[in-house]
């Protein structure tokens, strides 16, 4: 199976979470060994996860939540 960089980025969360089948995991590992851009992307992805886990658990401002909901609802109607 030829794995494209686009496909790797689409299933990277499953790879990082360890929820892929073993054969899929091995295919991605081989791709990452031979593809520097994807390996760098994985490292930045893992670093982002690490940093966000350190963020305090505080509620977002009500106005910001309302704006996000409005944008989300607008995107669903398109």
Image (cartoon, helix red, strand yellow):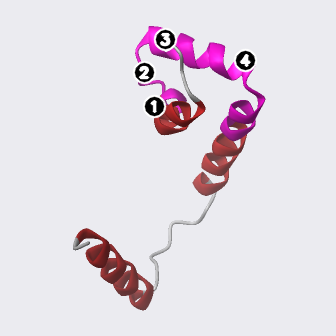
* Residue 37 highlighted magenta (yes or no): yes
Residue 68: image location, x then y, percent: 39, 78
Left or right side of 25 for 38: right
Q: What is the spatial separation of the Cα atoms under label 3 and label 4, in whole angstroms? A: 16 Å
Residue at image mark 2: 20
Q: Which residues are magenta?
A: 15-42
Residue at image mark 3: 1
Q: Which mark is residue 14?
A: 1
Residue 67: image location, x then y, percent: 39, 85
The structure residue drawn at horizontal position 65% and vertical position 47%, both measured from the top left corner, is 50
Q: Is residue 74 above or below residue 16?
A: below
Tell me if label 2 and label 1 are in contact, CB under 8 Å: yes
The structure residue drawn at horizontal position 51% and vertical position 27%, both measured from the top left corner, is 15
Circle nearer the N terminus (3, 1): 3
Mark 2 neighbour class, 10 Å CA radius: few under 14, some 14 to 19, many 20 or more? some
Q: Is residue 62 above or below residue 50?
A: below
Q: Secondary structure at mark 3?
A: loop
Tell me if label 1 and label 4 are in contact, CB under 8 Å: no
Q: What is the spatial separation of the Cα atoms under label 3 and label 1, in whole angstroms? A: 18 Å
Circle nearer the N terminus (3, 4): 3
Q: What is the spatial separation of the Cα atoms under label 2 and label 1, in whole angstroms? A: 6 Å
The structure residue drawn at horizontal position 73% and vertical position 17%, both measured from the top left corner, is 33
Quarter placement of the C terminus: bottom left
Q: What is the spatial separation of the Cα atoms under label 2 and label 4, in whole angstroms? A: 18 Å
* Residue 71 highlighted magenta (yes or no): no
**Which of the two marks, 3 or 2, is nearer to us in this view?**
3
Left or right side of 12 for 39: right
Mark 3 neighbour class, 10 Å CA radius: few under 14, some 14 to 19, many 20 or more? few
Residue 41: image location, x then y, percent: 69, 40
The structure residue drawn at horizontal position 31% and vertical position 83%, both measured from the top left corner, is 70
Residue at image mark 4: 33
């Amino acid at each position: 199976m030829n794995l494209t960089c686009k496909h790797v980025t689409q299933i990277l969360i499953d790879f990082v979470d360890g929820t892929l089948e073993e054969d899929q995991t091995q295919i991605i590992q081989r791709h990452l060994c031979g593809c520097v851009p994807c390996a760098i992307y994985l490292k930045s992805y893992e670093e982002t996860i690490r940093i966000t886990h350190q963020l305090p658990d505080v509620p977002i401002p009500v106005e910001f939540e309302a704006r996000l909901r409005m944008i989300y609802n607008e995107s669903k109607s398109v």
